[in-house]
Image: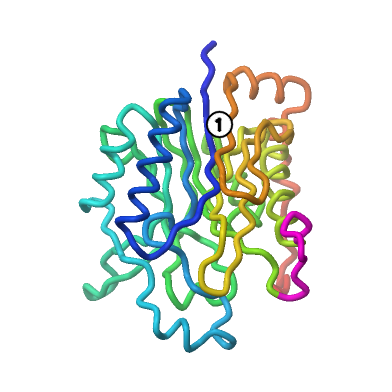
Amino acid sequence: MSTVRMAAVAAEFGRDLQEDFARVERLVAAARADGVRLLALPEACLGGYLLSLDRAADGAAEAADPGPPALALDGPEIRRLAALAREMTVIAGYCEAADGPGGAERRYNSAVCVTGDGVLGNHRKVHQPLGEDASYASGDGFRAFDTPVGRIGMMICYDKAFPESARALALDGAEIGVCVSAWPAARTNAAPDLAEDRWKHRFDLFDRARALENQMVWVSANQSGAFGSLRFVGSAKVVGPGGDVLAETGVAAGTAVAELDVAQALETARRAMGHLRDRRPDAYTYPAGAVRA
């Protein structure tokens, strides 16, 4: 059985696309030198995230910001990313431009998976927190796809707060879940020590829970530093299918690297208590007229 060396990045990215690509190039080169075959970069690493998720409090700043550059999936920037990836499998977040009804442009908060051969997969963020829906349209599903390092399923940030997201990918055969994020610290009652932040605690808990309940390998990248009114929690990590953290960056910028035999790890985790095998879909029903909060 073969092992896969994989890495998740915590790093800071902004509006300047050329600076972002320079940082991506350095991160890819360092990962390649370390023997990494799968590299996950953060949400919105090509062009930066939003300045704020609170339109009421930060409306003026938001209004003055043009937002991240909208990139086409088949455009030159994604081809540039693929050229940097070469033999590696690289996942990165970006603002995707796509045609909407009547030819109007729609923007999606997306993640793309590439190798030097081109695009292997693309995911549009489904779940939108707070005011994000003012900037992006919503994706409509979760689909796994094959890569040189195994079958992968992608999520973006808030997607991982919903168990159904990762479960849909696991049922589609995903062996590795990759979640790229721009997950901030709590804005109210902020912890002086970012490591003690309650939103960081949730970020870490979701990573471990999604890995454990689906008995899959989990790779979690996140932005670090600050952008606009947001302070990101970093905490990039690789989690094994038993929910154990194999490598992590803490709240600082860095790269979490772990190596494991994915097929063997999944087989071992699922041998006795197979969560996917032992499901009872017939019992998972919602009451008629159930109220949605």
Which quarter of the image is occupied by the N terminus? top right
Q: Is residue 284 magenta?
A: no
| Residue at horizontal 35 percent and vertical 42 percent from the top | 25
Q: Which amino acid, by three-letter code, is at mark 1?
A: Glu
Q: The residue tagged with tag 1: helix, strand or loop? A: loop
Q: Is residue 131 left or right of residue 213?
A: left
Q: Camera-side residue: 268 or 46? A: 46
Q: Camera-side residue: 205 or 139? A: 205
Q: Locate residue 188: give its quadrant.
A: bottom right
Tell me where residue 99 appears, x and y as whole percent: 26, 66
| Residue at horizontal 25 percent and vertical 45 percent from the top | 80
| Residue at horizontal 72 percent and vertical 37 percent from the top | 212
Q: Camera-side residue: 19 or 244? A: 19
Name the residue carrying label 1: 175
Vertical placement of 229 versus 246: above or below? below
Tell me where residue 218 appears, x and y as whole percent: 61, 38
Q: Is residue 69 left or right of residue 165?
A: left
Vertical placement of 257 versus 167: above or below? above
Q: Is residue 261 left or right of residue 292?
A: left
Vertical placement of 189 versus 237: above or below? below
Number of numbered tags placed on the structure image: 1
Q: Locate residue 58: give its quadrant.
A: bottom right
Tell me where residue 192 appears, x and y as whole percent: 76, 65
Q: Is residue 190 magenta?
A: yes
Q: Which residues are magenta?
A: 188-197
Which quarter of the image is occupied by the C terminus? bottom right
The secondary structure making up most of the magenta span is loop
Tell me where residue 222 appears, x and y as whole percent: 56, 51
* Disc 1 residue crowd, few under 14, some 14–19, many 20+, Cα 10 Å: many
Tell me which colouring the rendered structure shows.
Answer: rainbow
